[in-house]
Image (cartoon, rainbow, N blue to C red):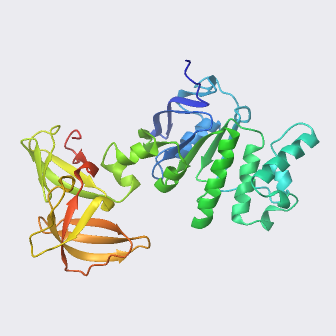
Amino acid sequence: MSTPTPRLEIQNIARAFDGRMVVDDVSLKVMPGQVTCLLGPSGCGKSTTLRVIAGVDMQDTGRIFIDGQLVCDTIYRVPPERRSVGLMFQDFALFPHLSVAENVAFGLTGRRADKRRRVEELLERVDLLRYVDDYPHQLSGGEQQRVALARALAPRPKIMLMDEPFSGLDNRLRDEIRDETLGVLKEEGTAVLLVTHEPDEAMRMADEIALMRRGKIVQQGAPYNLYNAPVDRAAAAFFSDINVIRGKVKNLLTETPFGQFLTPAMPDGSEVDIIIRPQHVKIDFDRNGRGPNPTPEDGVPARAVVERARFMGSESLVEFRMDYDGTILKATVPAVFLPKPGMTMWLMIRRDRCFVFPAPGHGRAA
């Protein structure tokens, strides 16, 4: 069976400004109907990558293919308007002097009746047909965003590039519009490359995530894999709060408040960071100093004192100071759990939920 052709493929794209590498050897593929998210902090090169794909900026090295056809290298370049690429940004960029229908039809060519049919089809799909003759200022922010989506989809682009298009909406509306947008894009079979700095948005929308840092893709894969098998400490921390337990390797083992961890890939004397997310810290009460009876998965219990507890809505966040070395550890538990500061408790951690990485400057991960 032949391998399907990616709708979008970029190979070894690089772009520098004033001698500073902004995009550094980035490669990825997006299949028809797939949503891939470029995720990373501000300034990591996400938006520049989108501009290069759209054709509004020129890469220094690398190639871009759409449906297997070369559209751009460092010599040959298909103009942006001929790449069948749609664009959506945080700024809806609707024309205030044009009606909703005229905004959606702006990029269409052909017979007037055909254009009107396409406009009405899309406006019905995004539940805005009743506003066909209204103007952008008469619509809410969410309605304007749906008009922008309909306009971007009107020419039937093969690829949709989205640069933080939902960040200007309030939280409740954002979830609704994101889900609606994703549904329409999936129905159209459009390949989507979405840029965001919000892990929750990437996890909610993407089939694949490409995590960027300092111009490079440092990890790529399904959201589940990036969350549960991060490539390094920074990748783990990007998706959630983390606790860091630092220890030193001796005879392939690292001593911690929770007993010894096997760290065979690290040389003796090197330091490692053992990472555990707050939701994977288990709490038990101090029973006359004897501690709980842990299961094998829970490992060795360690005593800690409550520093403070805060109710966060669906969960509570409790901060502890470890008896072992004074380290602060955080734990999240469902519902309301607010132990008083100074209260002594036992903590346990699931070893199968821990990640072990070399401490900065100390070699390979275990």
Q: Can you give x and y, in whole percent of width and height, for residue 277 in the image?
A: 31, 57
| Number of marks in the rendered image | 0
Which sits in the foreground, 337 or 111? Answer: 337
- Name the residue: 58% across, 33% down: 31
Q: Quadrant of residue 245?
A: bottom left
Q: Is residue 158 above or below residue 326?
A: above
Q: Is residue 306 above or below residue 71?
A: below
Q: Can you give x and y, in whole percent of width and height, for residue 322 in the image?
A: 16, 67
Which sits in the foreground, 155 or 349? Answer: 349
Say whether residue 317 is visible. yes
Instruction: State the residue lying farthest toward the top.
Output: 1
Q: Can you give x and y, in whole percent of width and height, for residue 192 in the image?
A: 61, 41
Q: Is residue 233 above or below residue 80?
A: below
Position of the C terminus by quadrant:
top left
Say whether residue 170 is visible. no
- Name the residue: 54% across, 30% down: 10
Q: Is residue 350 left or right of residue 65?
A: left
- Name the residue: 68% across, 28% down: 78
Q: Can you give x and y, in whole percent of width and height, for residue 20 in the image?
A: 45, 41
Q: Is residue 258 above or below residue 341?
A: above
- Name the residue: 57% across, 65% down: 171
Position of the N terminus by quadrant:
top right
Q: Is residue 138 left or right of residue 339?
A: right
